[in-house]
Image (cartoon, rainbow, N blue to C red):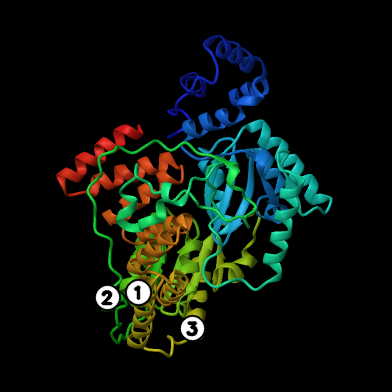
Amino acid sequence: MSSSTKKPLGKILLEQKVISKPNLDDFLEKQKQSGERLGSIVDKAFPEKHSSILKALSIQHGVPAINLEELVIGLDILRLVPRDVAVKNTILPVLEKDEHLFLVMADPQNHHVVDEIEFVTGKKVFRYVSLERNIKNAIDECYRLQESGEAFYRGSAVSSDKFEKLVAMKGRREARPAPAGPPPEPAAPPAAPTPAAARRPEALPMAEDLFGSAGSDDFSSETDELQPEAIERSIPSAPRQELRKVQEEEMAEGDDIPIDVESEKQETNILVVDDEEDILNLISKVLTENRYSVMTASTGREALAIVKKEPIDLIILDAMLPEIHGFDICKRIKGSAKYGHIPVIMISAIYRGWRFARDLKESYGVDEFVEKPFKIQQLLKIVETMLRSKTSAPRESKEEMSREAQKHMEVSAKAYRDGDLDTAIEHLKAAIRIDPLSQKLHYNLALVYGRAGLVYYAISELETVLELEPTMFQAMKNLAILYQEAGFKNKAIEMWERALSTCEDEESKQKIREHLVGLL
């Protein structure tokens, strides 16, 4: 939903009976004179309706809303977004969990700044919305507190007891070793959680297909800085009739891990990845003339598919690619047992933002960095040097790695059936470290995360599945459900539409259409 097509906030406020028509006319006139956003104007006039205004913003933008007055924010997170960037774009990072970054925005449709932040931090951004006035005040206060040496921001509605409890909990977490398995789930439920028996998502029956009880609203842990009261969610109800159910995949011990055995080869294979056709053709031509075997890709998804299927000796990789950033591709390859020995040469204009080229080796495993524009002979010399100094393939054969991954899968499957989800997650992650390009492993990990109630982690794994296998209907369907449950209405709509385009069953298509009508 672009800024130009989203529903006007004033209309939503009227429909939700937050304000009257005369109120709206008066507020719109004030907006013309001041240039301030309508939500902030209404909030100043009716502070007692703050939660209702946040709910209207959530409906307008299709993402969850956050009440900043109820948050405690660890200020170390501000290192990820410089103050000038936060002020310019009216954004504030509020929570960091592993590869996830939770960002509060006045305009969640500002895709450019989200892409920029994901690019330089290497984290997956989840967008939330709040009132522009409140975000600006919180930005000023957070960065002021950080400069004065404070460790936490405390929202005006956070009691002293609650604040002290949260700070003490954070201290205990930092003092003790990290527990096995994933950290507590970072999202937050409504203010008044219902009993466990009442939380099953009867209005979202498809969640049961894959995740069983993962539809629970209990997304957070009391140890998180982001508290249960913090988010006002507006999730449209799914139709009462159930969509066509798909049986939950069994993690059978006999399942094969998709790790192919490479055959012996004589030639040197170089993969060149760039979305600029002229550069791609130039590099390919020069390498071919120098008797290298060259494969090419113009998107990140194509590149991953080639790495997965073909024996590659070296990769020349553009940093900014469609669909998946080059940095993300490099991180996956260099962090795996199967592909980590492949040298990666990154090419791009030097990113003069918050990180510089010298950080690439440490952060992403890049072996060499070449700045655009470059001399082709310079690149060729680097290629020759890299191939001469290239480490050999892992000592373990592909068969041995396949057996090791299979063993992790079998242990995970047994632990899953026994209800030991931490062990199941641990062994699936170990298998993924061997082969991070296996969509099956990521899909099963999403299954276990969902069963454990770790919805945001399940979302991330399903997104990875669709990067690797864009036509997997079951992953699309369950990702759409989780987007909707977490309050990301726009993402849910996009994924339902994508699932509809790949669905082959007419009955399921009709039910998805009916579901989409309800959302739209």
Up the image or down, 128 lies above or below 10; here it is below
Measured as percent of width and height from the top left, residue 128 is found at 55, 42
Is disc 3 placed on a helix, strand or loop?
A: loop
Q: Which of marks 2 and 3 is nearer the N terminus?
A: 2
**Whole-percent x and y of residue 336?**
46, 75
Q: Give the amino acid type for the residue marked by disc 3 in the picture.
A: Lys
Q: Nearer the viewer, mark 1 or mark 3?
A: 1
Query: Amino acid type of disc 1?
Result: Ala
Specify the label residue 403 is tagged with. none
Horizontal side of 127 relative to 209 (left or right) equals right
223 w.r.t. 504: above or below: below
Which residue of the protein is positioned furthest toward the left in this rendering?
506
Place residue 266 in its image quadrant: bottom left
1 or 3: tag closer to the N-terminus = 3
User: Tag on residue 255?
Assistant: 2
Q: Which of 473 and 368 is in front in this view?
A: 473
Q: Distance between the residues labelled 2 and 3?
A: 34 Å
Q: Which residue is drawn at 56% across and 11% down?
A: 25
Residue 480 position in % (x across, y down) = 36, 47
Q: Marks 2 and 1: CB-CB under 8 Å?
A: yes
Residue type of the residue flagged with mark 2: Asp
Give the quarter of the figure containing the N terminus: top left
Residue 437 occupies which quadrant of the picture?
bottom left
Q: Across the whole image, how many numbered discs are drawn on residues? A: 3
* Residue for badge 3: 390
Image-based side of 359 in relation to 294, left or right: right
Mark 2, secondary structure of its residue: loop
Residue 383 in the image: x percent, y percent?
Answer: 48, 75
Q: Nearer the viewer, mark 2 or mark 1?
A: 1
**Disc 1: which residue:** 413
